[in-house]
Amino acid sequence: MEKLVINKVILSCFLYVFLALHFSPAASQEVEDTREFAYESWSMRGPARWGMIRPEWRMCSNGTMQSPIELLDQRVRLVSSLGRLKSRYIPSNATLRNRGHDMMLKWTSNTAGFVELNRTRYYLQQSHWHSPSEHTMNGKRFDLELHLVHQSLSGQLAVIGIMYQIGAADSFLTSMEGHLMHAISNRTYQERSVGVVDPSLIKFGSRRYYKYIGSLTVPPCTQNVIWLVVREVRTVARGQVSLLHVAVNDGSDTNARPIQHVHGRTLELYTNEDVIYRRN
């Protein structure tokens, strides 16, 4: 009996260490301060030179699986076996931070839920916005793109991208407007608690999604990131896009990285008619 108890204690310690290691922020995650680089093509810190700013950012210049890319239906491979994206998002405490070129909403624990793809769970870490969109779809660039960054227990990154065009207000951004207004009146690059935020309020609204292997779109431009870009384009109010720009206050007209070369990568489109998103 005593031996059984000891074994249980050892097993519990092992699981604790395992989860602590795998849920700790990965070294390959996006930089926390985007003021270290620029988006203007003429700048010495612009996108073409990101790989020269720091040695650990060299993938931004040398990588052959970089993001964003142009999503072209004429080169897509229709696939029904990719599997439906199953989500289980849970309201959780979050913080909002002006990173220098974007606003990042970061859930403060690993309890905000996950998406499941092919029996692997990817746990939600943070979300942020790019304007205009980074990815283009059949040659068209949109007004805004939201990135939902997830990480599996093994450290694999998966990012869900959602495109927006000017139209009706986005309900999730509407719920965040008070916090964005506070960011305008209190200029700071520190994380600010915004209380409990429900990720399931972020609407996907599409039954189809593109999938390809790419990279983070900001330094260190880490590769082997699974990209899942929702096919349906949603709407956002012009004032909401402007509010994101003003809240960041970096003086830039854009925080979108230029389109990267495909280098022969496969672009897949999930075509199953099952919905890819469900609210609990």
Image (cartoon, helix red, strand yellow):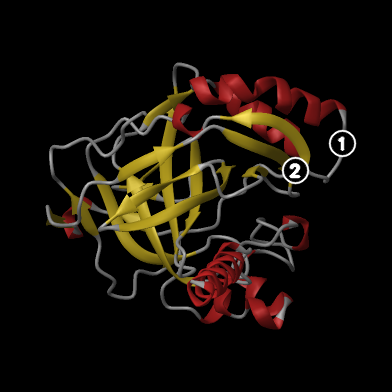
* Rendered location of residue 233, percent (x, y): 35, 33
Question: Residue extending furthest top?
Answer: 168
The label number, if any, that marks residue 98 in the structure image: 2
Q: Secondary structure at mark 2?
A: strand
Tell whether label 1 touches label 2 (CB within 8 Å).
yes
Locate residue 237 relative to residue 242 in the image: left or right. Answer: left
Viewer-proximal residue among 186 and 105 = 105
Q: Secondary structure at mark 1?
A: loop
Report the residue at 59% width, 20% height from top. 175
* Distance Cα–Cα, label 2 vs label 1: 9 Å
Report the residue at 38% width, 55% height from top. 121
Q: Earlier in the sequence, mark 2 or mark 1?
A: 2
Locate residue 100 relative to residue 47 in the image: left or right. Answer: right
Which residue carries the number 1 mark?
A: 187
Q: Amino acid at mark 1?
A: Arg
Report the residue at 69% width, 79% height from top. 52
Viewer-proximal residue among 265 and 8 = 8
Locate residue 34 relative to residue 110 in the image: left or right. Answer: right
| For residue 251, above or below residue 30 | above
